[in-house]
Image (spheres, rainbow, N blue to C red):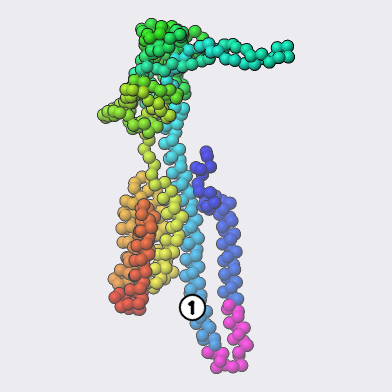
Amino acid sequence: MSSSNQGIPGLPDLTHPIELIQFGNQLLKASILLVFLVIALGVAIALISFALRRHQEDNMIFLGEWVVRYSQLLRGLQHLTLILVLLVVGFFLTSTLGNRYHHWEQAKVVQIAQTVAGDKLEQTAPQVRYVIQEPFTYNNQVNGKIVKVNDTREVTRFLSLAGSQIQVKLEQNTDVQGRSAVYRIDYSADYKVVNRLQNVQSFFFEAPPPDGYSLLSNYKVERSGTRLELVNPGDYGFPFSLQPGETANFRVTYQAQGGPRWVYNAAGQILSNFRLTATANFTPVEFASGIVPKEIKADRRSTQYTWIFNDNVSVKNPFGVFTNTTPIRNTGIMPRLLLLSPVLFLWWILLLYLSVPMSLQNVAIASGMFFACILTLTYLARFINPELAWTMISLIFLTLSWGLGANRSASIAVIICSIAGAVLPVCGLLVPFSGLTLSGASLLSAVWLAVRHWYTWYSFSPADRVK
């Protein structure tokens, strides 16, 4: 398995024992330090009280103030400790889910890529080759003198095809393992050759089979109905004679099997009177290389692409078709949301603390609700649209959040905080226009806190408490 399929590098994972042990050691050290700080503060208050024992009146005032502050500090430390523990545990949970979701996304991409993996079948246009004697001059040294020598040498030249009429039918099956797609090709092409030379009559018609095939059968080259035989194994050059001004017609046919992509390469030639018809008896399919066909005919079972160039054409990229896989969109959105979930949780909890009185019990219950909804969203997003999944989950989340309030006014305040601090931010990280949605959520949070604390538009009695 490749490293890209093993999660997001550098993130903690609860399923890794070594990371759990390291986290436990760090948490134990931090807890011991916090306990020593609280104990040290208590000892300091006791020492100051002992030093002021002779001044009873001053001692009572001083101790009264510091005991009240110390008790407030202890209560605040309880809430702070609980929130820190929830944040750390939530971070480890969401980072683990983010790693798992990233692994699942990459495995899905690899699985789809495997269905169209394999070497492409590439058919190269035939070439008409001939050899001529070309004079050339070189200098040679004879008896200490430089002598100019005139000689001849064989030079290979190529004759352009006068016409190409190609028909290819493609069937798609799966390989033996049932993982990758395999093309079965029925190829037939008619080529026209015109000898426009005056002093050349001997040619070679070079028609190689496609590259990348796993099976080639019934390969046949014919000239005017007469089959041409291979002279040397692996040499697909067929010699023929053609008088100046005359025309020869060749036909190439074969059946081949190979990877899920077929292309026709002009090999840098200028093709005249070119027509290529590729019929794919499967879906989904798309034409390759961005060269738009002149005609496209599609029905439920097949798609036919036709490229027609009546004069001449030269293309750098080959014509062809390939299996069009379903695109995987919006990858990385859920891992990003999971990594930012502890921040969203902290946003929501701070809004609740600034809006309604919160007890330790309700903080714990609220955190359980939030992370349970995130966990449910993580696994529902694998099967249905994440936006739709969060819409359904948020209705349950808001219904449960209503119970955090001791009365109707407090419950409405909790609902507003839940929408501004949890529902909208999560939705903003799921939709394409995240910035606009998060900006709206932050504006709603700021407006709500201003209305709640600075103005009398919405307020409730200080005696109102959460359950």
The residue nearer to you, when weighing 103 against 286, is 286
- Which residue is depicted at the point 29% across and 75% down? 457
The correct choice, above or below, for 282 with respect to 91 in the image is above
The residue nearer to you, when weighing 246 against 175, is 246
Q: Which residue is mark 1?
A: 72
How many numbered circles are shown? 1
- Residue 223, percent across and down? 38, 8
Residue 73 shown in magenta:
no
* Quarter of the image where the C terminus is located: bottom left
| Amino acid on which the number 1 mark rests in the picture | Gln
Secondary structure mostly taken by the magenta-highlighted segment of the chain: helix
For the residue labelled by badge 1, is the local secondary structure a helix, a strand or a loop?
A: helix
Q: Is residue 121 visible?
A: no
- Which residue is depicted at the point 37% across and 25% down? 313
For residue 125, side relative to residue 459 (left or right): right
Per the rendered image, the range of residues in magenta is: 41-61
Q: Is residue 419 visible?
A: yes
The residue nearer to you, when weighing 76 against 220, is 220
- Which residue is depicted at the point 41% across and 6% down? 243
